[in-house]
Amino acid sequence: MAATVRVFIGLMLVSLLGATLGGCSSGASGSGSGSGTVAAIDSTSSGSSGASLRASTGGDVASAVDTVTNSNMTSDASPAAAAGTGAAGAAGSQTGATVGSATSAALAISGAPASSVAAGTAYSFQPSVTGAASTNVSFAISNKPRWAIFSAATGALSGTPSAADVGSNAQIVISVSDGAVSKPLEAFSITVTPSVSSVTLSWTAPTLNTNGTSITDLAGYHIYYGTSPTSLSMVLSVNNAAATSQVIGNLTAGTWYFAIMAINSENVESALSAVLAVDLTNGASAGGSAPTASVDLSAVDNVYAIADSGTAVRNNGIDGIGSAYPENLLGASVTWSGASFELAGAGSADAVGNATIALPSGNYSTLKLLATAVNGNKHNETFIVTYTDGTSATITQSVSDWHTPQSYAGESIVMDFPYRVTADGGVENRDYKLYGYSFAINTAKTVASLTLPSDSDVVVLAATLTQ
């Protein structure tokens, strides 16, 4: 999906009739200059004080944004499509092997994991297993990417890297065990590449000179753009007076700035228009959905909160007596409050309590959690967000027991469950809940970690940061 921007922008040749034109506005660099006696282009004939520049890449319009001081400029923007390599399963260099040996020829693991993924694009790999001596196989992984989630029950590796994860993740090894032997998949790498987007600008041309005469020598436009509003270092010439749109591609994640000048037949430019900002961070455009970063809990997971019905709950479950959320109802991911949460799944420690969690480095406005209390409601629990400058913010939140919702301030019911899984794999038919909590944090500071309440009966299943 490509970014969409609509802009209404004033374009006019800067001289009055009989004046000498030359040079470009100080806002652009690299523009041509010239001189001549021409009438200035006015934009009043377009029905406003400026000709209109719009931008569209064919994506869905997310929302209206006005990012400049020119009162005639507005914009609509939708998430820009990540271009290039990187989609899960995408064609390209891939690795994978079926592994066996003379000592255990029966058990084998195979698969071809994609070797690259673009930032902001979902990645997924599921290995295949044959010849297991038992149906109760388990999986393990070494060198798991920090942005990915791994299921010890299925061997699935998935996740969505952010712009902060650009780079190579090498020597990843997934292995399978049937209780008797263990077999590894050949080591592979996943490279996270920068997301690349495009923006299509479109405009309505001015029709009058500033002296009120009709424009007869409009020759085209110069579009200036760059990653700084005061240094639009790139220029694209549109040498067609009839043109009303132009695609600008190969734009990496981040905020890009655009402005436009009209040119006449003598290649004399108008004044530079006001500058439009378009945010392509993680594929999100200005005014669209805020970029998110999933918090990797795998390094600190210490609670077995999810289980398959029919299978005994491991390690005393979520509440210390062997109870758990049913995986078949919970699923692999949950969407709440505009954010997506990835869940680790049954078969391994999949939640955390009474621990400090490393947060992905960045500046965010909101921390969102999927959590619950067990063994009773918990009042005024303390969550601490620590920033890289050594400062911290303490957040006090009451948390309902998963069976007795209290509708505490700041608490939302994310999912309802008609039963829970019991220690022996059976089900107990009572209502249980999973709650959501949204904490405002200091967007001017870079996050470092989250310290959960010291009460291990407050359990977090997933966390996401949003800008």
Image: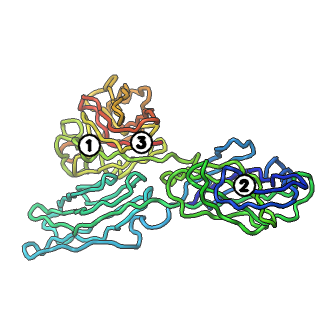
What amino acid is at disc 3?
Answer: Leu
Circle 3 crowding by C-alpha within 10 Å: few under 14, some 14–19, many from 20: many
**Mark 3 highlights which residue?**
465
Residue 289 in picture, x, y percent from top left: 53, 47
Image check: 180 left or right of 237?
Answer: left
Residue 417 in picture, x, y percent from top left: 36, 42
Circle 2 crowding by C-alpha within 10 Å: few under 14, some 14–19, many from 20: many
Q: For residue 141, what is the image quadrant?
A: bottom left
> Of circles 1 and 3, which is in front?
3
Q: Distance between the residues labelled 2 and 3?
A: 43 Å
Q: For residue 411, what is the image quadrant?
A: top left
> Of circles 2 and 3, which is in front?
2
Please indicate, yes or no, whether residue 134 appears anywhere in the rendered image: yes
Q: How far apart are marks 1 and 2 (CA)?
A: 64 Å
At a point 34% along the width and 23% down the height, the residue shown is: 380
What amino acid is at disc 2?
Answer: Cys
Badge 1 vs badge 2, beta-carbon distance below 8 Å: no
Q: Residue 24 carries which label?
A: 2
Q: Which of marks 1 and 2 is nearer the N terminus?
A: 2
> Of circles 1 and 2, which is in front?
2
